[in-house]
Image (cartoon, coloured by chain):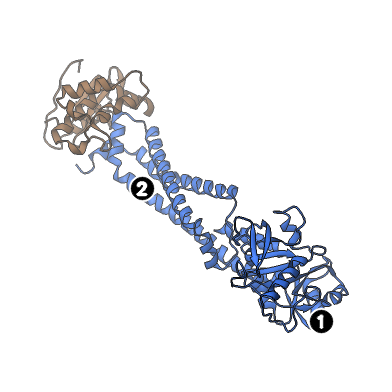
Chain colours: A blue, B brown
Amino acid sequence: MLLSLQNGMHSMERRLGADLMVVPRGYERRAESALLRGEPSSFYLNKDILLKISQIKGIEQCSPQFFLTSLNDACCSLPVQMIGFDPDTDFVVQPWISTVYNENLSDGQLIVGSEIDINHNNTLIFFRDTYQVAAHLDKTATGLDTSIFMNMNTMRSMLNGARGVGYAFDSPNLPDPDKMISTALLRIDKDYDLDEMALSVLSALPEASLAIPKQMMRGIASSLNALTSFLYISVFGLWLFAALLLSTVFFGSINERKKEFAIYRVLGMTRKKLFLLVMNEATLVSLFGSVIGIVLASLGVFPFSTAIGDKLNLPYINPDTRNVLLVLSFSLALPAALGPLGAIFSAFKISKAETYLVMREGE
Amino acid sequence: MDSDDFVSVVGHSGGGKSTLLNMIAGLLKPTSGSVTIQDQDVFALSDEKGSFFRNSKIGYVPQGQGLLANLTVLENVCLPFYLFKREGDVIPKALSLLERMGIGSLAASYPRQLSGGEIRRVSIARALINAPALSGIQDAS
C-alpha cells in the first residue's frame, strides 16, 4: 500500500508539470477538481491573456489548453474531460504522451486516460463524430486518467460537433480556441521564486486566478505523509507484536512438547541436532505462515486497489512487478527470520535440558 | 554384567531404581563413580559421541508413553536407526521385530490407536532396532 501511494504521488508529480496554472477568476477549485479528480469542467479566458503573460519577466514557458466536457447523452461515448493542447508550445502533455505514442498526434486523433474504455475499433464517438484513439496513457491515479487529450484542430472539430448537437456552453461567449483558452500553463524560470512569480502574475492579470500544482501536491503530500507515517508505525508495531507473539507461541509449544524432545535425546539425538530440529521446525512454520499471509494480503490488496485508492482519496498506483516481487521477498524473508529468532531461546533451553528430569516430570 | 546376562532390579518406591537405570542409559550423570559399558566410561564422552554410544549400544525403554505421537508404529521403531548415518534398509528388521512382539499388524497404526501394553511392546522393539549391547526397561511389569 505504501509503495502504491508513493507511486501515485510520483506519477502525479511527473504529470502536473507546470509551476502555475492561469484560470479564470473563481475557477481555481474547479481546475483542481478537473486535474486531481477528473471532474469534467470547462471555463474560458480571452486568449489575449497569453500576450500579457509573455510580457511578465521570469516566465520561461507558457502553453495554453482548452477544456471541453463531453455529454452523458447518446451523442457521446461517455462524459469526460477533454483537453486540447497546443503542440507548438506544450511542455506538459507531450512529454508523457511520448512514452506511449512516438508520433505527432494528427488531427482527429485522441490520446485517452488509462480509465477510459474504448471499443474494438479503437474509436470513440463525441458529439456524433467518430475519433480515432491513438494511444492509452499509463495510470496516473489523478483526474488525468479520465481525461482525453487532443490537438487544437481536433478540439475545433469537437466544438463544431458540440454546436451541432446544441451543446449549451456556460461561458457568456461561445468558446472558440482561436479566441479563448481555458488555462495557460506556466513554467517559471528557475532563478525566480514561485510565490513571488504567482503574485506578479496575479497583479498582471486581474481577470485571472491561479491554481498552483505544487500547492495541490503539498496538500496531498501532507495527507500522504501523515498516512505513511501512521502505516510505518503500525507496520513496525505489528512486526514487533508478531515477534513477541511468535516467541511466546514457540516457548509454549516447545515447553508442551518437551517430553517428545526428551525422547529424541533418549534415542540418541545430540543436543546440536535437537537444537537444529526445533529451529528448522520454527523456520518452516514461519515460512508457511508468511506464505499464507502473503496470499491473503495479496487477495485483499491487489483486486481491491481501485477501491482502496478511492477510499483513501489519494493517488494510488500498484507498484511494478519488480517492486511487488521485492516486497513479497521481504515479506517472506522477514518472518522466516523472525520465527527462528523467536524460537532460539526455547530451542537452546530444550537442547540443554536434563533429559532424565524432563522424562520424570509429572510422574 | 556379562553379555547375555539378565538382571532385574527390585526395590521399594523411591529407592533409586529409575535413577540407576537412567545413569546406565547415560541420561543422568552420577555424583560419584562412573558407568562403564564395554570398557567405555559413558560420561567421559562428548555429547556427540555419547549420543551415538547411547543410540547404538543402549536400548532404553522409558516408563509410560515413550512414543512419538505423530509417527506410525513402524516409523517410531525405525527412528533410532535414522538418527545417525547408517547403511542398509531398516524396515524389514523393524517389521520382523514387530512380528516377534506380536504386533506386526499395527505397523501402520499411530500410538493413539494402541493400548498401553501394545505401546510398551513397540517401545521394546524400538529399543532393540540397533541391536544394542545393553537393554534397559524401566518398570517392566
Residue B97 visible in the snapshot: yes
Q: Quadrant of residue A49?
A: bottom right
Question: Picture coordinates of residue A352 (x, y %)?
Answer: 36, 38
Give the label on residue A251, or none: 2
User: What separation in Å lies between label 1 and label 2 (alpha carbons)?
Assistant: 72 Å
Depth order, front residue of A244/A288: A288
Query: Residues at badges 1 and 2 in contact (C-beta under 8 Å)?
Result: no
The answer to whether residue B30 is left or right of residue B117 is: right
Residue named by callout 1: A203
Q: Quadrant of the C terminus of chain B?
A: top left
Residue that appears at 16% across and 24% down: B101
Sequence order check, earlier mark of 1 and 2: 1
Dot 1 falls on which chain?
Answer: A
Give the label on residue A263, or none: none
Look at the numbered disc 2 and give the secondary structure of its residue: helix
Depth order, front residue of B90/A308: A308
Depth order, front residue of A308/A80: A80
Question: How dense is the environment of label 1, judged by Cα within 10 Å: few (below 14), some, or many (20 and up)?
Answer: few
The answer to whether residue A170 is left or right of residue B31 is: right
Q: Nearer the viewer, mark 1 or mark 2?
A: 1
